[in-house]
Image: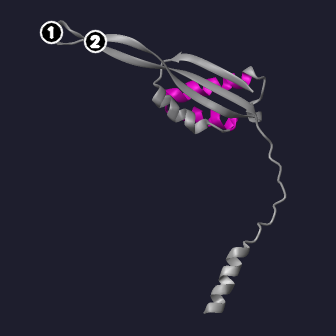
Amino acid sequence: MSRALIKHVRVSPTKARLIAQEVQGMNAELAIASLEFMANKAAGIISKAIASAVANGDFEPQEVEITSCRVDRASYIKRWTPRARGTATRILKPTSHILIEVAPAKKEKAAPKKAAPKAKKADEATKSDEKDA
């Protein structure tokens, strides 16, 4: 498992979480391809973080899946804007920490399917109903 952490990204955590939820559990190659066409600032940043996490583990994007994509709130950048009568109002610009974890994809084998056990009680109940009728 490898990971990438990008700190103090100038994007709102709530907006970045919407994108992060979309790619969680996806194949890394598919996630990067889908993020490329999203018209969102956070999509480009998360795409670069996924590519970094894949490179940190010396994997190929087709070999891994995203196990965790987390966006945490970081500090605010504080700015001031002038207001009436010589006062000022504070503007808070949010930043985020983005954590991406990738792991090799699990290859699923087709297991033989077992027949479901029959419910005896339901069969007995229908037989008794038939006798009563």
* Position of 21 relative to 88 (above/below): below
Most extreme residue toward the left is 85
Under mark 2, the amino acid is Thr
**Mark 2 nearby-residue class (10 Å; few <14, some 14–19, many ≥20):** few
Most extreme residue toward the top is 86
Image mark for residue 112: none
**Mark 1 nearby-residue class (10 Å; few <14, some 14–19, many ≥20):** few
* Position of 111 relative to 42 (above/below): below
| SS of the residue under disc 2 | strand
| SS of the residue under disc 1 | helix
Image mark for residue 81: 2
Residue beneath the point at 80% across and 46% down: 108
Residue 112 left/right relative to 99: right
x, y (%) of residue 107? 80, 43
Per the image, is 51 magenta? Answer: yes
Screen quadrant of the N terminus: top right
Q: Name the residue that disc number 1 marks.
A: 85
x, y (%) of residue 74? 49, 18
Which span is picked out in magenta? 27-55
x, y (%) of residue 7? 56, 16
Towards the viewer: 1 or 120: 120
